[in-house]
Amino acid sequence: VDALATAYKRRPGAAEEVTVSIDPATFGITFTAYDLDEDLNLVNPRDDTPKGDELGRIAAQTFRQVMNQRIREAERDRKFEEYANREGDIVTGIIQQTDHRFTLLDLGKVEALLPQAEQVPYERPEPGARLKAYIVEVRKTTRGPQVVVSRTHLGMVQRLFELEVPEISNGVVEIKACARDAGHRSKMAVYSNDPNVDPIGACVGARGARVRMVTDELRGEKIDIIPFAADPAEYVERALQPAKVRQVVLDEASMTATVIVDHSQRSLAIGKEGQN
């Protein structure tokens, strides 16, 4: 009905406003024209239904308009459904443009938005280069899906390891936790559900090949892989490796741990700029 009214208004000498009604029994179309008074009220109603061929042309024009609109909407919905379930996935795109606010990645069917806040400091995306990113959100807009991606999300480290390590993707090795200082260092705790599988060895790979693939993709970001421990004190001690820990004192009430090390191990336990 709205499309028919729009098509009617394109006629030479068309009224200022029109309402269209369709008889459901006969499918007859009636156009009621109106004028607007000074207060923008509809006045002077009259039948202004086009006759013969003119009505046919308006109906055909409207059909094309509606069909094109529906096709565009269906295409947008299809693209949205394709990406709506991919939050948490890694995608590879080609950098289209970059400025101080965001970088646009061409994913093939849609463009992805990489905001400045989601970019690793000191990375310099070059137009035309291929870049992997982590999907954090898919928004539905009138122009189609807007895919928001990140290079700093800790989920990117986890997903890259899932892609590189079959033992993770098939569930033998689990990533229990991950912490990240994007661009500098990530630390990941892993656990094996099979006593015959070394979780750290599986992640590192032969001659470090698997972890190197992840490190290369993250532009040299250092990655520490530690064995998970169910006991919190032991877990803290492992997390501070290679520092040698003398004692870990837990305070369950405040959820804090006091770690005692020799003076020579203090800077190693704290880590660069207190990262640990």
Image (cartoon, rainbow, N blue to C red):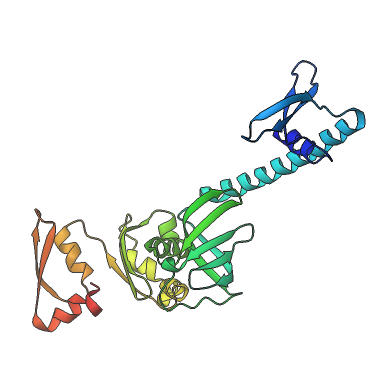
Q: Position of residue 117 (x, y in %)?
A: 41, 67
253 sits to left or right of 224:
left
The one nearer the camera, 128 or 65, is 65
Residue furthest to the bottom in view is 264
Q: Position of residue 261 (x, y in %)?
A: 10, 76
The residue located at (27%, 64%) in the rendering is 227
The residue located at (13%, 60%) in the rendering is 256
The residue located at (89%, 33%) in the rendering is 54
Vertical order, 269 against 196 (above or below): below
The one nearer the camera, 73 or 53, is 53
On-image quarter of the N terminus = top right
Q: Position of residue 184 (x, y in %)?
A: 35, 76
Residue furthest to the right in view is 53
Vertical order, 238 against 267 (above or below): above
The residue located at (38%, 71%) in the rendering is 204
Residue 46 placement: quadrant: top right
227 sits to left or right of 106:
left
